[in-house]
Image (tube, rainbow, N blue to C red):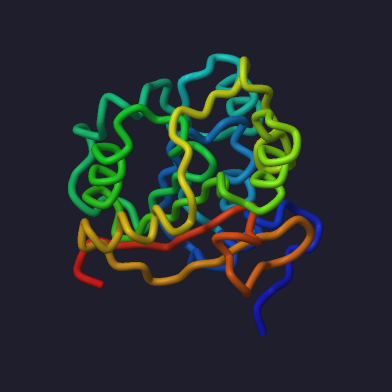
């Protein structure tokens, strides 16, 4: 029976379930390193991260994490093909300018890639736009329009179609609603989509 991680973020819980123990992991845009720290502690992962924010790097260093100060937009040229079991892009893909380039690089460097992102067409967001006529703010999209780091506004269906066009294999997927997993019509009822992908034809 799979171990439960009820006391942590739901998206972290799913990623912890998917990643095999002892894996070599690269977390792109790792933030404060909370997920990376959990992977090392709970799954015995050999974890590495890349982060651009000095403030977040200080938090990672305080946790004893191996972090490189860098911009993932500049590519992963220093890493060999399939040098990691997993590359993670959780809640950072929508903030990248050259999404396609970074994803293709991640698929080259990692045997598998985990991508998590907010679903911008979640039904509550649609209703906020329809009835309030304003940019939606909710748990998945917590920023005001003038302070949001998000550059790309994609849906779950958009990402599935992207994978189909690019011949990226979707190995696993999970969808999170407000308080639990969303199984029915995730493009409408899920706040967050999480995908395990790899290079190759679907």
User: Which one is nearer the viewer's eye here, 64 or 188?
Assistant: 188
Q: Quadrant of residue 61?
A: top right
Q: Give above or below for 2 relative to 147.
A: below
Q: Residue at x 59, y 63 (%)?
A: 175
Describe residue 166's horizontal placement relative to residue 65 as left or right: left
User: Which one is nearer the viewer's eye here, 173 or 182?
Assistant: 182
User: Which one is nearer the viewer's eye here, 25 or 88?
Assistant: 88
Q: Residue 43: x percent and y percent?
A: 58, 61
Labels in figure, total: 0
Q: Residue at x 65, y 30 (%)?
A: 135
The quarter of the picture where the N terminus appears is bottom right
Q: Residue 60: x percent and y percent?
A: 59, 29
Q: Quadrant of residue 54?
A: top right
Q: Residue 74: x percent and y percent?
A: 27, 24
Q: Residue at x 62, y 21 (%)?
A: 145
Q: Give above or below for 127 relative to 151.
A: below
Q: Quadrant of residue 58?
A: top right
Q: Give above or below for 139 relative to 151.
A: below
Q: Residue at x 29, y 67 (%)?
A: 169
The quarter of the picture where the C terminus appears is bottom left
Q: Residue 16: x percent and y percent?
A: 59, 61
Q: Give above or below for 139 relative to 142.
A: below
């Amino acid at each position: 029976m799979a171990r439960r991680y009820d006391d942590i973020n739901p998206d972290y819980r799913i990623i912890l379930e998917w990643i095999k123990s002892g894996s070599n992991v690269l977390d792109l845009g790792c933030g404060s390193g909370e997920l990376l720290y959990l992977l090392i502690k709970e799954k015995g992962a050999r974890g590495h991260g890349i982060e651009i924010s000095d403030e977040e790097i200080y938090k990672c260093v305080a946790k004893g994490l191996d972090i490189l100060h860098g911009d993932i937009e500049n590519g992963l040229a220093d890493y060999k093909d399939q040098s990691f079991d997993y590359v993670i892009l959780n809640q950072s893909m929508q903030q990248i300018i050259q999404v396609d380039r970074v994803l293709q690089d991640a698929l080259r460097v990692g045997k598998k890639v985990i991508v998590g992102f907010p679903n911008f067409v979640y039904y509550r967001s649609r209703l906020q736009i329809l009835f309030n006529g304003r940019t939606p703010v909710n748990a998945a999209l917590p920023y005001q329009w003038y302070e949001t780091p998000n550059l790309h506004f994609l849906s779950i269906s958009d990402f599935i179609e992207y994978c189909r066009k690019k011949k990226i294999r979707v190995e696993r997927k999970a969808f999170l609603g407000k308080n639990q997993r969303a199984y029915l019509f995730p493009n409408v009822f899920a706040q967050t989509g999480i995908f395990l992908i790899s290079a190759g034809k679907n």
